[in-house]
Amino acid sequence: MKPSDLPLFRSYGRPAVAPDGTVFAALSTPDLAGDRYGGVLHRLEPAGPPREFTHGPRDSAPVLSPDGTVLVFLRAGESGPAQLSLMRTGGGEPRQLTDASVHPLGASAVTFSPDGRSIAYLAPVVEPGRYGSPGAEGADQLDPEAEAPRRITRMSYRGDGKGFLLGKPEQIFLLDLFDEAGAELPDAAPRPVTAEPGPLGRPAFTADGREVLYVRRAAVDSVHGEIAAVPSDADEPGIGRTVVHIAGDAAELTVHGKTVYYIGSAFAGNDFAGQTDGLWAAPLAGGSARRLTDVQTVQVDAMAGAPVLVADKVVVAVAGRGSVSLRAVPVQAHDAPLDDLPVIIGGRRVVKAFTVAGSLIAATVAGPGSAGDIVTAVVAAAPDADSSETVLTDVSAPLRAAGLCTAEEITGTAPDGYPVHGFMVLPPPDRFAGPHPVLLAVHGGPHSAYTWAVFDEAQMYAAQGYAVVLPNPRGSAGYGLEHGRCIVGQLGTIDADDVLALLDAALRREDCDAGRVGVMGGSYGGFMTSWLASHAADRFVAGISERAVNAWDSFTGASDIGYFFADGYVGSDRDEQWARSPLAHADQIGIPLLIIHSEQDWRCPLEQAQRLFVALKQRGHETEMLVFPGEGHELSRSGRPRHRQQRFEAILDWWSRYLPVG
């Protein structure tokens, strides 16, 4: 496997499942020739191979009407943002629902009303004179450089991957698709129902369809959320009424009867760091929210999807020790521990997304041999019964044929006796006899985790002869509340001990060369790389620090999340922030260091790389900086395919120079 094999890492997105068991899902493929991600919708049935339902070139995010007869999805051309299209599940030509004249920056996050006649969705409302729109008086559209200055009055004024937010706040729109007789309304126009100042979560209808619920910030620049509602028949867009006050944050709403279920965490002030997200239930009529899952042991994964009620159970995705499983939470539960939650789809796999129709679940599942395939399961009626499961696709067969490397669990013990867990990916034994040079790769977050899912980066490096160590140190997600929170105020201490402890466990193996070790990582992993390059330089021959936090003082003001994130993890004391900054210890960096960053990274801004690069250059240290134009913080995961290929090539070139195989 080599960087040009990036197109083999295909995967399905969030599936849509009809009551009759038919599944629709978008297959995404990195296209190096077109330098974009191609997408087509597939129709999947229990018997027979997947069939193309649309032809792209960039189709994604299918959502089915409650009766399963109508599909609304996102469609984009060769370039530009995605718009909404509608298609009957029986086939035919898709009908475009929105276009650039109404939504110049596209639309997303579609939800059907309970009767299936309308949809709610999110779309940015562009300020006149910005982003190519005409001026307030109908003047010609302006080039970005000619726009009026931005008046900024809050700290949350921009977002990585989204740019400046104040001139294009996302709002909720409603669009009527059918009349009472079921006839299509081709001339219906979208109508905005919110006029909120800040970002909003995916909309959800109440059971009677009369209101639309969503999550918003409790106040400008607040890290706390709240659930609000607006009438679905509102004549004018407005500010929603508060439905649920939350002492923490919330995401992914589902309404059932008079109860709203959501995923979130509870904390006071800015104490968000390392909190475990749980499943909550709150009465729509008012009153306190109730946490259904245990705060200590259950980490609900909101990225996989909203909670779904099936009979007397709520289905959610739960992360733990590198797996993400689907579990059933009793609706009457209160602080239910992990062991009391029956598994629907589990094992050494990762449920990336799921949807439900009746008792049938369709999920996108990744694992050691798959980047993301479609699996269906029926929720068992009896608590102790196993859920039947069917695998509908195998899009990673070409990836396995190219030679997937073996991933395995590995454990170690930190100096204070704390157990450390992680993974290791080894080179193919028929090509590399070993002992292998070793790459210690630290994940971002820090409240994230390596998993059993196929990881393109580890596969690329292992295929070239490197043993790749993937630690989940203290601070990672999926190991309980204390594991996630104990690094608050201690970055670079016990987490660094854990990372090195797992490395030591790997180096005790005969197939790993303890004298040839490199360190690398991105975001928090970049921070850890820069930190270890000065605090444990004798352990490594070289390093690659990518999109890193290198100086907490400037990160506080320059990052889109810096105004709360630095305080949450490091604290507000300036001396302590500097002491926890790799830049403060740049004089002790003792290994060649490649610094990789993106030009438009607003999560860890480019200045974080520039300051460290100049500090190293001024002392004559061996360093290089690689800057990718037009990319943000998510380059390695969702950047342009060609840039991702070039990034892999640059990383492998660096290691071939300082840590050659053989």
Image: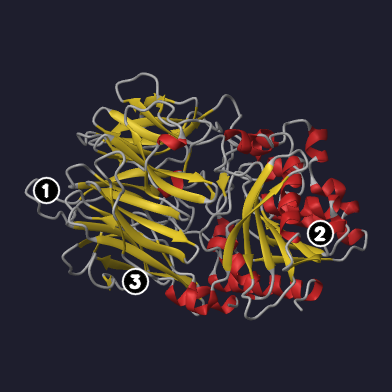
**Residue at the location (67% across, 34% down)?**
486
Question: In the rendered image, which residue does mark 2 sit on?
Answer: 613
Label 1 element class:
loop
Question: How many neighbours does mark 1 have within 10 angstroms: few (below 14), some (14-19), or many (20 or more)?
Answer: few
Protein image colouring: secondary structure
- State the SS at label 2: helix
N-term mark: 2 or 1: 1
Question: Does the CB distance between marks 2 and 1 fall below 8 Å?
Answer: no
* Mark pair 2, 1: CA separation: 62 Å
Name the residue at 60% across, 78% down.
2
Kindly check if marks 1 and 3 are in contact, taking CB atoms under 8 A apart as contact.
no
Left or right: 298 with respect to 461?
A: left
State which quadrant residue 409 falls in: bottom right
At numbered mark 3, what does the secondary structure look like: helix, strand or loop?
loop
Q: Position of residue 475 (x, y in %)?
A: 64, 41
Is residue 169 in view from this perspective? no
* Residue furthest to the left: 181
Q: Are marks 2 and 3 in contact (CB under 8 Å)?
A: no
Does residue 429 appear anywhere in the picture? Answer: yes
Res. 179 mark: 1
Q: Of callouts 2 and 3, which one flags the residue occurring earlier in the amino acid sequence?
A: 3
Q: Amino acid at mark 3?
A: Gly
Viewer-nearest residue: 181 or 438:
438
The x, y position of residue 425, in whole percent, is 62, 65
Three-letter amino acid code of the residue under disc 1: Asp
Residue at 74% across, 40% down: 494
Instruction: Determine which residue is flagged by label 3.
Output: 56
Can you say whether 137 is above or below 340 in the image?
below
Q: Give the Cα distance between marks 2 and 3.
A: 43 Å
Of mark 1 and mark 3, the one earlier in the sequence is: 3
Nearer the observer: mark 1 or 3; the answer is 3
Q: Is residue 54 above or below residue 158?
A: below
